[in-house]
């Protein structure tokens, strides 16, 4: 198991963990920057100051309870639906590729793509506002039509690692995909 | 080449024996379905397998051997297992073995004709047999369009799920059965069955037959008489209650038909319709019990006449306002008075008609309210129809105003063309120039001026009544939307997703179990259920929904020109 510290596109620190389970099975986990206590308390304080200001103006205590309610609900929604803690990619040669995103509340969202649908794993570049960012993506193909790209699935969307981290992941994935190509070749020979 | 073995997690503690299942050569994977225990007679095992193969249409065979060495008879067992590979010849012969107190298994294969010289890699995938058997895989759109499922099953997971689902008959024997073969699978401790389900299955046959008979009677009555007489068929098509009743009748016919559901989709559809009808009727009966308590019907009937009177009074005030100086605009006195008096007389007729009906209102409402037991959707449709009937005079005014305005607009556009010396060529559907006589031009210009100066008055009446009509249409539309929602929501599927989420599978997810170098890779396959949005989208029931047919731009154009608009027109055809 290997780990390394890299930077995301936004500048935050992210950690990449690589595990090799067997010759054709590898897992890459990218850990996003955690929720900072600073930003959480800043948001809470601003909401409550605004609520207190409204209370002073209107003298209605419902405003304060509403503010508490909104803060709680907002925090729960943010942790459960928005804040992604870790994104991992599990590549099992001859079975498929699995992407998991785990949220801060513990919820996990998994997508599995079978190997017959995977055409290739590439690094694409995109122009976003004034920046050029690189992202790793899986090219999908229709199994009946091996020469067209039917869909592009981007990986590591929330953590957005920079090119150096992506290159590591790309090299490892390509090693496994190469094995698939050689095994396909030997199978067609026989 | 990587060899994948799908092993049921219930057999992990089974005694040593033979592995039976299906071998999928194109994917180099073996799906193990059960373990046959010693002692057995090879001939009987082969016979049993051929019987099961005939029933389930799966290519079942002996895949290899399984040894769970709790005892210390290792040497003898190994030789015995090798001999077995000569009896049940299968390419490749898989040997799985598990040591005592060890989590890690070892796996080796014997091949008569080794295809590749290099060492093979194994992947062991554990799966929950019961869940995989009961679940239904919903592949994404790109794979569903394949017509030839049996031929080249491009989806590996589809093949695995298919194999386990079809081999249901294999799981019907448990280890307490006195047969020549002892199996271990997920039901080997005892076949599961539910008394309630069996009783309901037995009871449902006569109930279905009775229901089919009643429904055929009702539908024959509907088809025979209604189509003959013109007023009845006209009313039938206009009232939304009748449409809703017809819709529900069709649903009942689908449920009570004797044919079993061919595939999973039809079964889910039937179940959804049944749950939807049940909830509908339950809500309807609840509504009925609330309405009939404390004489609410009487109260409703008592408030209905004053409400109708109030609406009429408001309309009269509105017309008086229009006949005066509405919003500071100066109207053409004569036309204003004519139109205003005409509409006022209309309202007077309507009010006297309502007062004529008033003694019977309570009785009518009482009997109509009884029909709420047929379902909440029927009650809502009746409400929508009552609103339509009560605001019939607004509809009439809208039609009069629209026709007048439309006539003016067409007249103006035609005379404008005359003013410029052009004419509309009906044959060529275009505007051509034309030379008019002097008297034609004179009359035309005169009429044009008259129509132009009378336009604001007619336009104002049209505007006011169109707005009122649109208000009523929006209210009716909301009610129809609610009815549609109750009709089309697949409640059974949503509840299934909530309670037994493994039955609706979108895909699978793998978890890597503890590894040891040198031992094969172990993965746990779990079912990834569909999201609620895709459940609703996949299993939505078809409805007779009437969404706005016109886009906003064509609607505005029609309003401007004065064409009559029917935004919620039922066309009688199904829309998903």
Image (tube, grey):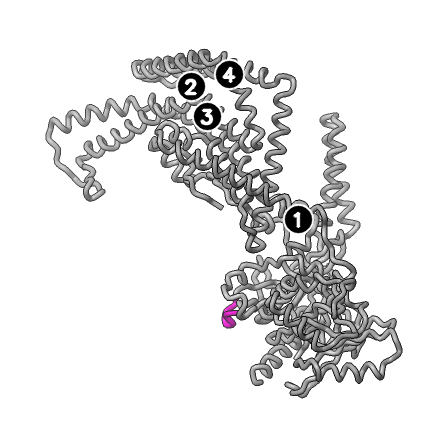
Question: Quick check: is B544 in the magenta stretch?
Answer: no
Mark nearer the N terminus (1 vs 3): 3
Neighbor class of circle 3 (other Cα within 10 Å; few <14, some 14-19, many 20+) is some
Q: Is residue A48 above or below residue A182?
A: above
Q: Secondary structure at mark 4?
A: helix
Q: Residue at x 59, y 15 (%)?
A: B299
Q: Secondary structure at mark 3?
A: helix
Q: Which residue is mark 4?
A: B361
Q: Position of residue B77 (x, y in %)?
A: 82, 81
Establish whether labels 3 and 2 are both on one chain.
Answer: yes
Q: CA distance from mark 1 to mark 4?
A: 45 Å
Q: Which residue is mark 1?
A: B496
Q: CA distance from mark 3 to mark 2?
A: 30 Å
Establish whether labels 1 and 4 are both on one chain.
Answer: yes
Q: Residue at x 61, y 41 (%)?
A: B275
Q: Which residue is mark 2?
A: B327
Please give left or right for residue B190 compared with residue A99 in the image.
right
Q: Is residue A164 above or below residue B82?
A: above
Disc number placed over residue B388 in the picture, else none: 3
Judge by depth and name the residue closer to the eye, B134 or A68: B134
Q: CA distance from mark 2 to mark 1?
A: 59 Å
Q: CA distance from mark 3 to mark 4?
A: 16 Å
Judge by depth and name the residue closer to the eye, A172 or B138: B138
Give the magenta part as a residue range: A144-149
């Amino acid at each position: 198991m290997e780990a390394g510290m890299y930077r995301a596109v936004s500048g935050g620190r992210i950690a990449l963990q690589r595990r090799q389970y067997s010759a054709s099975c590898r897992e890459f986990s990218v850990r996003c920057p955690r929720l900072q206590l600073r930003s959480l308390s800043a948001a809470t304080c601003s909401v409550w100051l605004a609520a207190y200001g409204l209370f002073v103006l209107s003298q209605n205590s419902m405003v304060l309870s509403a503010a508490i309610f909104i803060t709680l609900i907002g925090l729960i929604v943010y942790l459960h639906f928005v804040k992604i803690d870790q994104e991992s990619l599990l590549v099992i040669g001859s079975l498929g590729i699995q992407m998991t995103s785990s949220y801060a509340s513990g919820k996990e969202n998994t997508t599995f793509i079978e190997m017959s649908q995977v055409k290739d794993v590439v690094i694409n570049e995109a122009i976003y506002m004034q920046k050029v960012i690189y992202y790793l993506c899986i090219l999908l193909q229709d199994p009946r039509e091996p020469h067209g790209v039917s869909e592009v699935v981007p990986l590591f969307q929330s953590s957005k690692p920079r090119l150096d981290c992506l290159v590591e992941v790309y090299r490892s994935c390509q090693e496994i995909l190469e094995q698939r190509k050689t095994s396909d070749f030997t199978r067609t020979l026989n | 080449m990587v060899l994948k073995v799908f092993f049921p997690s219930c057999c992990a503690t089974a005694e040593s024996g033979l592995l039976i299942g299906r071998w999928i050569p194109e994917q180099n994977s073996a799906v193990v379905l059960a373990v046959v225990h010693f002692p057995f007679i090879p001939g009987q095992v082969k016979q049993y397998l051929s019987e099961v193969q005939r029933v389930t249409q799966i290519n079942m065979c002996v895949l290899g051997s399984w040894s769970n060495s709790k005892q210390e008879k290792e040497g003898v067992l190994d030789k015995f297992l090798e001999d077995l590979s000569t009896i049940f010849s299968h390419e490749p012969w898989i040997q799985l073995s598990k040591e005592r107190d060890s989590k890690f298994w070892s796996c080796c294969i014997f091949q008569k004709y080794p295809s590749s010289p290099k060492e093979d890699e194994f992947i062991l995938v554990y799966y929950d047999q019961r869940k995989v058997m009961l679940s239904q895989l919903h592949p994404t759109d790109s794979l569903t369009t394949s017509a030839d499922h049996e031929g080249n099953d491009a989806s590996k997971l589809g093949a695995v799920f298919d194999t386990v689902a079809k081999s249901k008959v294999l799981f019907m024997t448990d280890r307490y059965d006195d047969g020549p073969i002892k199996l271990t699978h997920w039901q080997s401790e005892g076949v599961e069955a539910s008394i309630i389900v069996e009783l309901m299955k037995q009871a449902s046959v006569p109930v279905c037959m009775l229901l089919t008979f009643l429904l055929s009677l009702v539908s024959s009555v509907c088809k025979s008489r209604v189509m003959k007489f013109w007023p009845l068929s006209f009313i039938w098509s206009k009232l939304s209650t009748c449409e809703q009743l017809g819709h529900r009748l069709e649903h009942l016919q689908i449920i009570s038909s004797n044919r079993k559901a061919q595939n999973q989709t039809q079964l889910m559809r039937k179940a959804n319709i049944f749950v939807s009808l049940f909830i509908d009727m339950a809500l309807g009966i609840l509504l009925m019990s609330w309405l009939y308590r404390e004489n609410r019907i009487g109260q409703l009937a008592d408030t209905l006449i004053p409400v109708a009177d109030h609406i009429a009074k408001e309309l009269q005030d509105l017309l008086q306002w229009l006949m005066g100086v509405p919003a500071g605009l100066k109207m053409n006195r004569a036309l204003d008075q004519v139109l205003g008096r005409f509409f006022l007389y209309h309202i007077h007729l309507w009010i006297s008609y309502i007062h004529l009906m008033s003694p019977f209102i309570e009785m009518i409402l009482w009997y109509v309210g009884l029909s709420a037991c047929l379902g909440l959707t029927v009650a809502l449709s009746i409400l929508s129809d009552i609103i339509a009937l009560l605001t019939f005079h607004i509809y009439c005014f809208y039609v009069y105003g629209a026709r007048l305005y439309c006539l003016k607009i067409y007249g103006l556009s035609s005379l404008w063309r005359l003013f410029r010396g052009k004419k509309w060529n009906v044959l060529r559907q275009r505007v051509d120039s034309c030379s008019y006589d002097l008297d034609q031009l004179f009359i035309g210009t005169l009429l044009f001026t008259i129509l132009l100066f009378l336009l604001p008055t007619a336009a104002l009446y049209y505007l006011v009544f169109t707005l009122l009509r649109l208000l009523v249409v929006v209210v009716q539309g909301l009610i129809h939307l609610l009815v549609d929602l109750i009709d089309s929501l697949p409640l059974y599927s949503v509840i299934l997703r909530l309670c037994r989420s493994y039955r609706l599978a979108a895909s699978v997810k793998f978890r890597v179990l503890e590894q040891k170098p040198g031992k094969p890779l172990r993965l746990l396959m779990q079912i990834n259920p569909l999201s609620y949005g895709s459940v609703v989208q996949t299993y939505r029931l078809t409805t007779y929904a009437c969404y706005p047919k016109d886009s906003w731009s064509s609607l505005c154009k029609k309003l401007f020109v004065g064409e009559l608009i029917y935004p919620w027109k039922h066309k009688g055809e199904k829309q998903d």
